[in-house]
Amino acid sequence: MNAKNRYSQIIEHIFFAHYKEGDREVRFEREEITAAAKKLKVALPKNLGDLVYSFRYRAALPLSVQAKAPGGESWIIRPAGRARYVFVATPERPVVPNGLMGETKVPDATPGIIAMYALSDEQALLAKLRYNRLIDIFTGVACYSLQNHLRTALPDVGQVETDEVYVGVDKRGAQYVFPVQAKGGKDRISIVQLEQDQAMCRAKFPSLICHPIAAQFMDESLIALFAFEDSPKGLVFSSEKHYRLVPPEQVTVEDLKEYREKAD
C-alpha cells in the first residue's frame, strides 16, 4: 500500500469517527493518527505531522470526506491549537493562476551560481523573488526581506511557518508587512496558510499594514504572484500578476512601449 492510500485511509477514519450529519466543523488531535493506523493495521507514518500537512497543502481529501461538504463548499483543515486540528466547511476558493492573464517581462537578475545550486522549487522561487525585487515590483512598495522560514507559535492556532517575511515603506511613509508563501508547480496554494500568515502579522506586527502574498512557479521562468487583503468576509483576493524572467536583451522596444502605454 503506498503512502498516499495509507494517508487517505487514516484521515478518512479520523473524520468519520467524529463527523455527524450536518456538521460544519470536525475536530481531532494528532495523537488520533497513531490509534487510527493501529486500528486499520496500516504502517504508521514516520512523521505524524506530514499526514496532516499533506491534506492541508498537497493532496485532495478522500472522496468520501469531500462528499460530506455542503453544496458549493469544501473541507479545509485548520490548526486549532498545539497538535489539534479542525476540518472546516468553507466556500470553495481555489488559488490557481489564471491561464488567460498576460505576462510582464522582467530582466532576470538572478545570479547564475544561485540558479545552479538552489535545492528545491520553493528555495529557487524565493531566491528569484528576492534577487529580482519582484515583491517591490508587484506591490509598488520598497521592500526588504526581514526573515525567511519564520516559525512562531500563536494562541489558538499553534505553530505556523511563513516562507519569507518582507517589510516595506511606500511614498507616503506608510509601512507594510508582506508574508510570502512560495509554491512549486505541484504544491497547492492554501488559503489556510495565508490566513495563518495574516494571524501571525496581527500578533507580531500589529502596527503595519498586512497583505499576504502567494507565489507560484508556472514554469521555470514564469512566476504568478497573488495579493490578498482583509475584508468583512475574511481574507480575499485583491490582485494577480504574472512575471516572465528573461535575459535583458529579450525585453524589446515594443515591450517597453506597451508597458509605458499601460502606465499612462
Image (cartoon, helix red, strand yellow):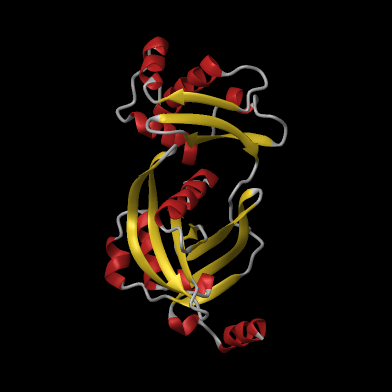
Residue 205 in the image, given as x and y percentages of width and height: 42, 58
User: To which quarter of the image does residue 142 belong?
Assistant: bottom left
Quadrant showing the N terminus: top left
Q: Residue at x 63, y 28 (%)?
A: 24
Q: Is residue 102 above or below residue 80?
A: below
User: Looking at this rendering, what residue extends furthest in the front direction?
Assistant: 207
Return the residue nearer the eye: 188 or 221.
188
From the viewer's perspective, is 224 left or right of 182?
right
Residue 93 in the image, given as x and y percentages of width and height: 63, 45
Quadrant showing the C terminus: bottom right
Q: Residue at x 69, y 29 (%)?
A: 70
Can residue 58 be seen here?
Answer: no
Residue 221 in the image, given as x and y percentages of width and height: 46, 66
From the viewer's perspective, is 257 left or right of 10?
right
Return the residue nearer the eye: 83 or 221.
83
User: Looking at this rendering, what residue extends furthest in the right direction?
Assistant: 71
From the viewer's perspective, is 225 left or right of 158?
right
Q: Residue at x 40, y 65 (%)?
A: 166
Residue 73 in the image, given as x and y percentages of width and height: 67, 36
